[in-house]
Amino acid sequence: MKIAIASGKGGTGKTTLAVNLAFVAGENVQLVDCDVEEPNSHLFVKAEKVSSEEVSLPVPEINADLCIGCGECAKFCEFSALAALGDAPMVFPEMCHGCGGCMRICKQKAITEKERRIGSVDTFGAGKVTLVHGCLDIGVVMAPPLINAVKKRINADGLVILDAPPGTSCPAIAAVNNVDYVVLVTEPTPFGLNDLKLAVGMTRALGIPFGVVVNRAGCGDEEVQRYCKEGDIPLLFEIPDDRRVAQVYSRGELIIEGVPGYREIFEELLRKIKEAVAAGKADL
Amino acid sequence: MKELVVISGKGGTGKTSVTASFAVLADKPVMADCDVDAADLYLVLHPEVKERTVFTSGHEAVINPDGCTGCGLCEEYCRFNALKYTEDADGRKTYSVDAVACEGCGVCVAFCPVKAIDFPDRVCGEWMISETRVGPMVHAKLGIAAENSGRLVSLVRKESARVAEETGRELVITDGPPGIGCPVIASLTGASQVLVVTEPTVAGAHDLERVLKLTNHFEIPASICVNKWDLNEEMTQRIEKRSEELGAKIAGRIRYDRGVTMAQVEGKAVVETDTPSAEDIKAVWNSLSI
């Protein structure tokens, strides 16, 4: 069972939900942090790194002896990763998506590929919880290939909780694509509602069943709840606005351990999510 | 012309609330919302749209099912698993493109032996030039599940610079996206100054470190301010110390204040209300000496 915790808006509590749900589950859980630009789950899991693997993309390398400067490769490249200037083209590896097209199009066979590092995939063990996360190197543009590399480590047998990046574009899509269920976390504010609507649009476009969790309920208005009700969107749970939660979170501690009563809240939340996943499957 | 870009690394630290207040405090700015996949600045500045333009970027592969012979070369060559194999009721095999997975690289288009793959422009969203109570604003809306947010960000910045030029305004204030990847890099390259809004949490500190390494990488002067600083004073001090080590200036602190959310609910900038943190935001703005 693969459940992604996502949101349009940042800072609504995705990581808090993902991590606390993983530790309250009491079974073997794989926690998969797909926010490779700013991975945070490991700050709360506090476990030893078990392994670290480098992730790279194939980028072109020009053999100047074979290149006749025809410029076909640069003309072909959709991403401006090659620029023809009469002689052998210049390569801009940071623009390259690794499609391999330039290598195939070159009649002189003057292009080979070399690996360019974009980040790493690290695994941490903490009892029943195994955390896998990706960490994008600073200055690297391309998050989605690293997210896909992280998701290749998913062991689909047990419970898998994915912590998605914020937003609704390529990285968020790469993270939630092909999961069984998406939990959209938001806060009851105009920004929260606006970005929830975008996230609902994205999740519907991908055809994945989803439900909403309102975090910090009571801090703003009731418009998110009204939107869910009017749109027939399952509102799975409301977590109350509580400064104690913010303080425990600020120190990097688990809410289920740091604030009395929250273990029960997260147990209840996990039960509701599991019911919704089962109901979502029945609908398909 | 100067450009101040407000970013955060971690999402939800208060970038847009701070940016909207700067819009009100600044002398004749042009506003740019570069958080194109979750744009919220309009909810405070209430722009009246003057010009709306469709944003197309790159291409997408589309297979003509009548032409496809089902040979499978496209699937073999595609590195993004974007080709889906289908067999119809008569047993005829064809391929189709999963638009979500398609990177728009054009490899399948170029190598299809029967030329059965079209490569039309990809519509990725729209961008707008608007008027607000503080001046012009350039903003955008990425299409649902669309790509190329980085290119849309670059376009918004280019247009806001043009608007500034044409209207004789000296300052562009840009509301940036979270993270450190494609749209963030597109938001800050070549900017005159960056303000990072962070929060006093382990996650805020961790993400700030990465975002300051990014601004250092691109050699852009950075300042930081800790929002909700009194949630964890010790963490605030630690963040400020580390930021100075990384070469950033400290622009100030903003207190934890429920009035910030209430201003948002009312559709106002925080500094347009008399909630206590409005003073803190004014102090941050003044310390940036723009």
Image (cartoon, rainbow, N blue to C red):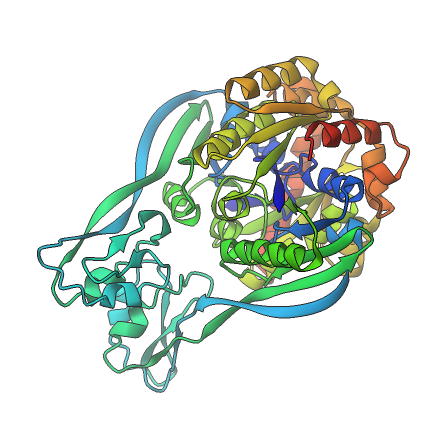
Position of residue A90 in the picture relative to residue A63 (left or right) = right
* Extreme residue in the front direction: B168
Position of residue A38 in the picture relative to residue A213 (left or right) = left
Instruction: Indicate the position of residue A189 as horizontal and vertical percent values.
Output: 78, 44
Position of residue A22 in the picture relative to residue A70 (left or right) = right
Establish if B103 lies above or below A122: below
Residue A273 location, quadrant: top right
Q: Residue at x 80, y 50 (%)?
A: B134
* Extreme residue in the right direction: B274
Establish if B243 lies above or below B139: above
Position of residue A128 in the picture relative to residue B31 (left or right) = left
User: Number of numbered discs present?
Assistant: 0
* Extreme residue in the left direction: A65
Q: Nearer the viewer, residue B125 or A254?
A: B125
Q: Residue at x 28, y 43 (%)?
A: A116
Q: Nearer the viewer, residue B14 or A6?
A: B14
Instruction: Indicate the position of residue B156 as horizontal and vertical percent values.
Output: 59, 56
Q: Nearer the viewer, residue A229 or B22?
A: B22
Instruction: Indicate the position of residue B79 as horizontal and vertical percent values.
Output: 31, 58
Residue B251 location, quadrant: top right
Establish if A205 lies above or below A143: below
**Residue A29 in view in this figure:** no
Q: Residue at x 54, y 40 (%)?
A: B179
**Residue A87 in view in this figure:** yes
Instruction: Indicate the position of residue A243 as horizontal and vertical percent values.
Output: 77, 24
